[in-house]
């Protein structure tokens, strides 16, 4: 993956209307002290907020963007600007001495520089904390108040970007509310939220809400082709399936690099399900459960892909198939087991597994249950 940090508006892939709205705020010198960018995962809110912060802190800005070369811009790009602060969920740990964002700042900076479009799962993988519950706790609130009490280094703004404020616990949320009600001078809060239902209504009422829609398909396709080394056709196909979620698109591309892993696991799983061999079933179940959560999700999506292609092979005589050579060879024998007798139940079970993986279900129990159900469903299609 290329090391790419989208700090300028011209480099950010997000909704053009939102970019113009933020640019207009700066141009008119009417920047609200508390703004909440609300949009689905993968809509580019974090790079958008960083580009906005860079424009606000730039020494020589144009009407629409930061210059990218002044000392202030260089500090923002290096994530060392003393007036730009980040808050994000962390997994609290006395043993590892983690109580706030500052304790894992190195990991955060490394991730955002290498892969600026990411989600909570990717962040937890970076922290080696998959399956744990990250929060923004009360200690974080104390750090925020301390940082914002200091005089601005640039004599412009102090900017606090809060990623996933819905992860604030009750104590942190109440302290944040007080800060929003009585903000320090020349302070700007940028709250980047996926789900407003988990945020105090009083906090919502004290912020300017900016809705960030999913990213346009063509923008995602161009980004994938430029930054992830895939050809135009693949980029367009993946972008179309991502439904405006660039993180989903990136994960799909990375999943494609693990294609052989998913293909081999799927073959083992289906053969074990057909023979109903309990030892083989549990072995392959354990293999899938041992993957990290993103790879588990990609494996489920891969299975759904194979089911779909099996139906296409059976009922459309192989038309519109999107298969690699070894997949095509496998489906010549396997596809007959996937038909109108079991396809609905198979897709339901895989979709349910995906749903529960996203919600931190116990992977070992989840996949053990799935493989047992598959033994009945595969034979149902015979």
Image (tube, helix red, strand yellow):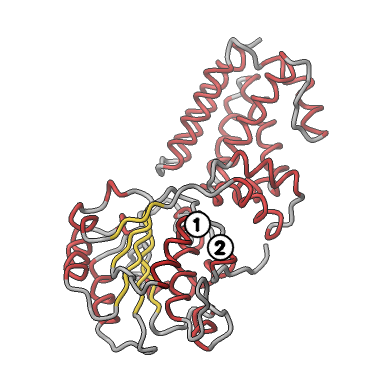
* Residue position marked by numbered label 2 in the rendering: 12
* Res. 99 image quadrant: bottom left
Q: Residue at x 50, y 64 (%)?
A: 47
Q: Residue furthest front?
A: 28
Asked which quadrant contains residue 153, the reply is bottom left
Q: Position of residue 59 (x, y in %)?
A: 48, 86
- 73 vs 305, left or right, is left
Q: Secondary structure at mark 1?
A: loop
Q: Are marks 2 and 1 in contact (CB under 8 Å)?
A: yes
Q: Residue at x 30, y 81 (%)?
A: 147
Q: Is residue 8 above or below residue 152?
A: above
Relative to residue 362, is residue 247 drawn left or right? Answer: right
Residue 48 is situated, as x and y percent measured from the top left of the image, at 48, 63
* Classed neighbour count for the residue bearing mark 2: other residues with Cα under 10 Å, few (<14), some (14–19), many (≥20): many
- What residue is disc 1 on? 44
Residue at 20% of width from left, 52% of height from top? 201
Numbered circle sitting on residue 167: none
Q: Nearer the viewer, residue 66 or 141?
A: 66
For numbered disc 2, what is the local secondary structure? loop
331 lies above or below 126: above
For disc 1, the neighbor class at 10 Å (few under 14, some 14 to 19, many from 20) is many
């Amino acid at each position: 993956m290329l090391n790419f940090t989208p700090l300028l508006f011209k480099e950010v892939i997000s909704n053009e209307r939102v970019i113009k709205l933020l640019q207009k705020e700066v141009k008119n010198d009417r920047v609200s002290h508390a703004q909440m960018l609300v949009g689905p995962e993968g809509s580019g809110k974090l790079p958008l907020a960083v580009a906005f912060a860079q424009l606000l802190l730039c020494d020589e800005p144009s009407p629409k963007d930061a210059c990218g070369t002044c000392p202030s811009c260089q500090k923002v790009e290096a994530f060392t600007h003393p007036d730009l602060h980040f808050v994000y969920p962390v997994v609290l740990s006395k043993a590892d001495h983690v109580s706030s964002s500052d304790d894992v700042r190195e990991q955060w900076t490394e991730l955002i520089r290498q892969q600026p479009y990411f989600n909570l799962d990717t962040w937890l993988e970076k922290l080696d904390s998959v399956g744990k519950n990250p929060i923004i706790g009360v200690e974080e609130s104390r750090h925020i108040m301390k940082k914002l009490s200091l005089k601005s280094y640039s004599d412009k703004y102090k900017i606090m970007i809060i990623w996933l404020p819905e992860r604030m616990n009750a104590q942190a949320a109440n302290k944040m509310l007080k800060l929003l009600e009585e903000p320090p001078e020349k302070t700007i809060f940028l709250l980047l939220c996926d789900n407003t239902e988990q945020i105090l209504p009083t906090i919502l009422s004290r912020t300017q809400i900016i809705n960030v829609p999913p990213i346009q398909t063509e923008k995602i396709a161009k980004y994938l082709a430029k930054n992830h080394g895939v050809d135009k056709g693949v980029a367009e196909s993946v972008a179309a399936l991502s439904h405006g979620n660039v993180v989903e698109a990136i994960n799909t591309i990375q999943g494609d690099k693990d294609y052989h892993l998913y293909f081999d696991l799927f073959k083992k799983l289906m053969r074990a399900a057909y023979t109903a061999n309990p030892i083989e079933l549990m072995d392959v179940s354990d293999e899938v459960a041992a993957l990290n959560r993103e790879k588990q999700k990609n494996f489920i999506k891969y299975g759904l892909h194979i089911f779909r292609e099996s139906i296409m092979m059976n009922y459309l005589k192989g038309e519109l198939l999107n298969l690699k050579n070894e997949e095509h060879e496998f489906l010549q024998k396997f596809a007959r087991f996937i038909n109108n007798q079991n396809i609905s139940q198979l897709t339901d079970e895989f979709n349910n597994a995906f749903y529960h993986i996203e919600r931190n279900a116990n992977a070992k129990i989840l996949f053990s249950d799935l493989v047992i159900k598959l033994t009945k469903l595969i034979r149902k299609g015979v």
